[in-house]
Image (tube, helix red, strand yellow):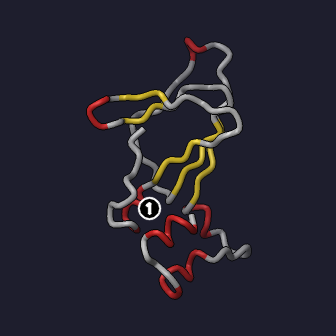
Amino acid sequence: MGLMVTSLGLMGEYVKWFKPNYRSKSLQALVQLNSYPVCLDPSRAMGLALHTDSSLLTLFNQSNTSGLQVLHGNNGWVIVPPLTGALAVNVGDLMHILSNGRFKTTLH
């Protein structure tokens, strides 16, 4: 997060809000953490309608599940393959707005 904000040239007073305040619940809207367990019966799995996330960033722990799909320009829907030990990161609407579109929100 810090690197993304710094890359936008925002310093000092502009990013004062970013300093963690552990007495505040405000960071809940900034970063979203998701983990979707494997469905033992894929024929009963329900996906979500296409959407973007309202947060700054969404971190996905995919484990060995390859259910995440993103809309990738002219390539259409692309499956995001899980990588062992890695997190998938989606840019959310708030980061898209904060960066004036430099970081694009992810339709997934």
Left of 67 or right of it: where is 69?
Answer: left
What residue occupies the far left of the structure in this picture? 74
* Front-lying residue, 46 or 107: 107
Q: Where is residue 7 in the image (x, y as percent from the top left)?
A: 46, 69
| Residue found 50% across the figure and 57% down from its top | 55
For the N terminus, the quadrant is bottom right
Point 69% across, 76% down: residue: 21
The residue identified by callout 1 is 95
Relative to 61, is 43 above or below? above
Left or right: 74 as drawn, with respect to 23: left
Q: Percent from the top left, x then y, of residue 62? A: 63, 34
Q: Where 46 falls versus 14 (above or below)? A: above
Q: Is residue 75 left or right of residue 22?
A: left
Q: Quadrant of the image for the C terminus?
A: top left
For this orientation, the residue located farthest to the bottom is 13
Residue located 63% across and 43% down the image: 87
Of 94 and 83, the residue lying toward us: 83
Based on the displayed image, in which of its 4 quarters is residue 88 positioned? Answer: top right
Between 75 and 28, the residue placed more toward the observer is 75
How many residues crowd mark 1 within 10 Å: few (<14), some (14–19), many (20+)? Answer: many
Q: What element carries label 1?
A: helix
Please tell me whether residue 52 is drawn above or below residue 101 in the rendered image: above
> x and y percent of residue 92 in the render?
45, 54
Question: Please, is residue 88 above or below residue 21 in the view?
Answer: above
Which residue is located at x 50 percent, y 72 percent?
A: 6
Figure quadrant of residue 50: top left
Residue 36: x percent and y percent? Answer: 64, 33
Q: Which amino acid is tagged 1?
A: Met
Q: How many marks?
A: 1
